Every structure is written in structure tokens, then in C-alpha cells.
Image (cartoon, helix red, strand yellow):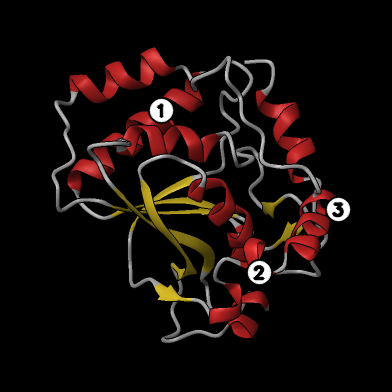
Amino acid sequence: MSPRILLGKSPIIINRWRLTTALLFSLAASLSIQTSAEDDVAIFAGGCFWCMESDFEKLEGVKSVISGYIGGHVGNPTYKQVSLGTTGHTEAVQIEFDNQVVSFVELLERFWINIDPLDGGGQFCDRGQQYRSELFYLNDEQKATAQASLDAIRSQQQFSGKVKTQLTEATKFYIAEDYHQDYYKKNPTRYNYYRWSCGRDKRLKQLWSKK
């Protein structure tokens, strides 16, 4: 991550809005997609993996969130290599979830309201493709569901033609160094300062609070 600076606020919870829920669920339903018991892993990239880990671990039905790297061309990348932007990887999280409690569609809803889909050069204060937003699918069902959610976002008037988030088949996910795991729990003061200073929650509020 670029020099970290952080918002001291907890992640935004938008109770009045469900990411065009009716549209998203109808699209998924029309595809007759149901996640099976063995398809309970999702991989999302949304900038700083500390923040993504914090945002998803608060969701009921999520069993674990692991910070790591994906989408590059170097085997076993280190944080130093990835942060330099030379490996092609992006920071990401691997989410293990109970699909009897929370669906892949609901994870996608949480994903969108915690990223800036209009930013193609990184996320918030973290710049470079190593901080890009991206959806990584693990099978055809996830691909179709994620594509439906991406289409739903693109159909929204304020996002039309501007969405930079990509949908990509998952490659090998490399687990990040241990000190990155649960960073927000291990170093709450530093994490909160980084999140506040990075402007993450301020930007998220600008993008999503009117919905």
C-alpha cells in the first residue's frame, strides 16, 4: 500500500439502500443461479485489503476474510513487490462464507458500496493498478452472477459509461504476509488513522449515501 493514512470512522452502513436490490436479484434469479455448498469462496479487490477485510468480516455469514494478492505474473509475490506495482497483482481478499446465511449476491452488494467503481487508477489515496477494483470469479455461476451485478451498476444513471471495475477469471491467490491479516484488529489506531486520512469513507458517502 502506498503510505497509509486512514479514516477514523467505521465503514459506512447504508440501511436505506440495497444496490438496486430488486434489479440485481431479478437478474440473478433469471439466470437460475444458486451457489452450491462447495462454492463458498469469493475473491474481490477493492483497494487496501485491510479495509476490505474489515468491511466484509462485519457481515453475518462470513466465516473468514484473508488478505492477499491476485492477478499478476510473478509467483509468490511479496508485499514490497506488489506495492511497487511491478508484478501485475492487486491487493484482494478471499472470503469464505456460509451460503445458507449470506449469498454471493449479497457479498456483491457489500462489495459495491465499499469501493469507488469510477476510479480506474487505484482506490482512494492508494494509486496504481496494484490497488485496482476487480471481481474475480471462480466458476461459471459466479461469473454470470457477477456480470449481472456489474451490468446493474453500469445501468445506473450516475455510473453509466464510467464504471472501471473489471470482471476477471480468478488466478492463483497468494496469501499476504501475516502482519497484514486482521490489521484493523491488531493496529486499530494506525488503521483508523489510515482509513480517515485516505478519504475512503468520505468518498463512499459521496458515491452511495443518496441511494
Front label number (1 vs 3): 3
In the image, residue 129 lies at what x, y percent?
A: 61, 62
Between the C-alphas of marks 2 and 1, the distance is 37 Å
The answer to whether the residue labelled 2 contacts the one labelled 3, judged by CB atoms less than 8 Å apart, is no
Front label number (2 vs 1): 2
Of the two numbered discs 2 and 3 on the same chain, state the one appearing first in sequence. Answer: 2
Of the two numbered discs 1 and 3 on the same chain, state the one appearing first in sequence. Answer: 1
Q: Residue at x 31, y 20 (%)?
A: 25
Question: Of the residues shown, which amino acid type is indicated by label 2?
Answer: Lys
Between the C-alphas of marks 1 and 3, the distance is 32 Å
Q: Quadrant of the C terminus?
A: top right
Q: Residue at x 44, y 86 (%)?
A: 76
| Element type where label 3 sits in the image | helix
| Element type where label 2 sits in the image | helix
Q: Which mark is residue 151?
A: 1
The answer to whether the residue labelled 1 contacts the one labelled 3, judged by CB atoms less than 8 Å apart, is no
Q: Which mark is residue 26?
A: none
Between the C-alphas of marks 2 and 3, the distance is 19 Å
Question: Of the residues shown, which amino acid type is indicated by label 1?
Answer: Asp
| Element type where label 1 sits in the image | helix
In the foreground, 153 or 104: 104
Q: Residue at x 79, y 65 (%)?
A: 190
Q: Which mark is residue 197?
A: 3
Q: Quadrant of the N terminus?
A: bottom right
